[in-house]
Image: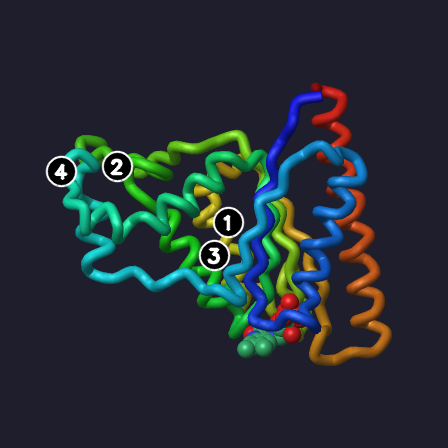
Amino acid sequence: MAKRTILHIDSSARVARSHSRRLSKLFVDAWLTERGQDDVIYRDVGTNPPPFMTQNWIAAAFTRPEARSEAMKATLAFSDELIDEIEKADVIVLGAPMYNYNMPAALKAWFDQIARIGRTFSFDLERGDFPIEPILGGKTLVVLSSRGEFGFEDGVRRHMNALDPGIAACAHYLGASEIHTISAEFEEFGGERRAKSVEAAEAKAKALASSIASVLKAAA
Ligand SMILES: Cc1cc2nc3c(=O)[nH]c(=O)nc-3n(C[C@H](O)[C@H](O)[C@H](O)COP(=O)(O)O)c2cc1C
């Protein structure tokens, strides 16, 4: 059976009590139960946030590779390392809590590092319509999230949900041709609603891992 690679990213600032970390681990564990031979690359941007972009970073990224100085190459080295991880991945698993209705700044910093001309997108100024084209493709993106409030998918707070649309808008940089989002809500309320939401999210995460993994198994 062909070996696949999962890129597992966590972005919660919490470690011990993080629900998104628990859900992302549950997905990966369920995957490995089906496909134990696969590789997992793990990156924790929650505890090790990528640096923000700087003027030097932007100048280096928009300089043609053959014209880059050694200092520019060094400035982009970490971004290159993160993009190498994405290139290797067949499935990208993102543990993504909602912070202030959006993604954690550490996860946004990761997206900023991997959105790179010539590596994850091409830019054709001759074209008038939509000159940005993704370079990578064929990957599956799985977002495992936890939220304090509720109603972000199709309920009362859907207009406040800047997390899921924000990830979806950037997903082409990852080469994601499929996006699955599973979230547990009501974390700030606790009680039965939270327990049910967590139970449902866990069941969905396990079922999704087995269904994608078994499709690959059958195809291999
Ligand atoms: C700094 C911070 C900001 C948060 N902002 C929101 C928010 O805007 N909306 C919401 O529903 N929950 C919010 N929450 C609650 C978290 O989404 C919830 O605690 C979730 O479980 C966090 O993920 P984690 O358990 O993986 O750390 C916030 C929590 C923190 C710590």
* Label 2 within 8 A of ligand 1 by Cβ: no
When the figure is inspected, residue 164 is found, relative to residue 150, above or below; the finding is above
Distance in Å between CA atoms under marks 2 and 4: 18 Å
- Residue that mark 1 sits on: 168
Q: Nearer the viewer, mark 4 or mark 3?
A: 4
First along the sequence among labels 2 and 1: 2
- Residue that mark 2 sits on: 123
Closer to us: 108 or 10: 10
First along the sequence among labels 2 and 4: 4
| Residue at x-position 36% and y-position 51% | 78
| Quarter holding ligand 1 | bottom right
- Residue that mark 4 sits on: 67
Amino acid on which disc 2 is placed: Phe
Which secondary structure lies at badge 1? Answer: helix
- Residue that mark 3 sits on: 166
- Residue 179 visible to the viewer: no
First along the sequence among labels 4 and 3: 4
**Along the horizontal axis of the image, is 79 left or right of 46?**
left
Contact, mark 3 vs mark 1 (Cβ under 8 Å): yes
